[in-house]
Image: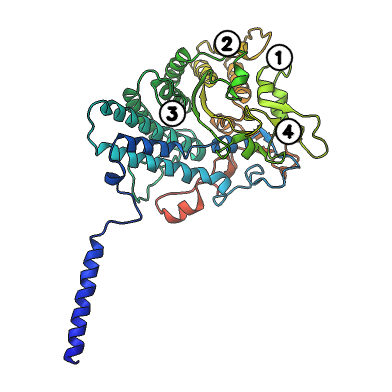
Amino acid sequence: MSKLYKTYTIVLSLLILTASCGKLDLKPTDTIDPSRAFRNVNDVNMGVLGVYALIDYTQISLNATVTDEAAYPTENTVGNSDAYRWLYNPSSGSVTGLYYTYYRAIDRANRTIAGLDALTFTGSDVATASRYRGELLALRAYLHFELLRAYASAYQAGALGIPYSKVSGVVYPARDNFETVINNAKADLAEAKALLPATSNDKTRISNRTIVAAIQARVALYEKNWADAVTYSSEVIAAAPLATKAQFPGIWTDANDNEVIWKLKRVGTTDSRVGDFFFRQTGGIVLYAPAIKLINAFDQVNDIRYPAYIKFDATRTGTKSQYLVNKYIGGTSSAPGLTDIKLFRTGEMYLIRAEAKAESNGDAAADINALRAVRINNYSNSTFADKTALIDAIYAERYKELAFEGHRFYDLKRRNLPVQRLATDAANASGAVTMLPTQAQYSFPIPAQEVLINKNTVQNPKY
């Protein structure tokens, strides 16, 4: 080898080594360093808002399409039908999309908590930062619990749940059991509650203890912790009375927010719209109509929920559905379907308390009758022969009161009951009339990509 070549080789090697060392000193450009992203309390607030940005109406759409809440009309030639026809599998984005969306939100919450904890605050920022931390912990608990409702193999101790994530990073977690997720959510909620004020006027964020109590009540219901369910639902009921008959219709047009505990604010013309983007499409096509079974469940003359939730339009003829979901129609013609998404209401709390009391031999009838009295004109109190009659009445009331709010599928699953559609509602369902608890689709599948990449996780049974 010539000296010139040797010299060239040495110089080139030094240049490569120097360049390599320089590159090794550079910060990665594909991640955000929390120490740079979160510099003050305002940055933390932006992180909190980033978590809210990923919460939408997916739970509403999932529960409507796979149950007896909605029907798939013939005029719908563009909508996704695999969920409605129970043809979904681990590759079906219609039922697996929520998994990644909410884990993205959880990751944002964990990153923001880490950034907040690394900062030092003074003056009034101390209280503000504490409040944001409470908000983030409550959001983390809520998001995990909603994932648990969707993807748990069953709602009981020992059943496959979902991973409970408390730190941000590239990890390959195994699925936590149902009770582990519940206990982690309860711990986050308890810590959050201590950091938040007793009251506030903002219902678009988890801004006070009443909102946390509402989440705690729902968690306790699924845990079958009847004492906690009564305690937390009672706390909410005391703080937020039911809407009157005059106020109730205005909840769904955003004319008022009586009895709304927590909602997702929707503004403008491009925001996520439950009504216009899911139940209807611009141009008048009905994508999903209210099921005849649900329509028949109401006293159509006296129940004020019926016209608030369901619209009949005799001018729609031929293959068009004459029934439309009216619950998210909105209050303006310029943005149909644009309404705030109601995540928690006092009506749900009455039904949680009624169920908890019925299961623990308390006076559940009082809560059912109290709710019906403000929803049904000329209502007379009902009596119930036994516990079974009470429970049946509570679930029938949940079917009506909470229609199109993201509960029906999970309610049936809590009692191990089949999804049973009327033949009329299943006309376009390709035979999907009865879904038994023994079928794979009785639990939503973990995404196929997750199972493929994460060798520590397992799929729900029978997929």
Q: Which amino acid does label 3 sit on?
A: Arg
Q: Residues within 10 Å of mark 3 (few under 14, many from 20)?
A: some
Which label was assigned to residue 370?
2
Is any part of residue 291 visible from this angle? Answer: no
Which label was assigned to residue 205?
3
> Where does label 1 land, which residue?
302
Left or right for 239, reference 114: right
Q: What is the distance, in whole Å, between disc 4 and disc 1 at their CAs? A: 24 Å
Q: Identify the element where label 1 is drawn.
A: loop
Name the foreground residue: 350 vs 435.
350
> Where does label 4 land, which residue?
422
Q: What residue type is labelled 1?
A: Asn
Q: What residue type is labelled 2?
A: Ala
Number of the front mark, 1 or 2 = 1
Image mark count: 4
Name which of mark 4 and mark 2 comes first in the sequence.
2
Q: Residues within 10 Å of mark 1 (few under 14, many from 20)?
A: some
Identify which residue is drawn at 60% across, 25% down: 252
Name which of mark 1 and mark 3 comes first in the sequence.
3
Left or right for 362, reference 328: left
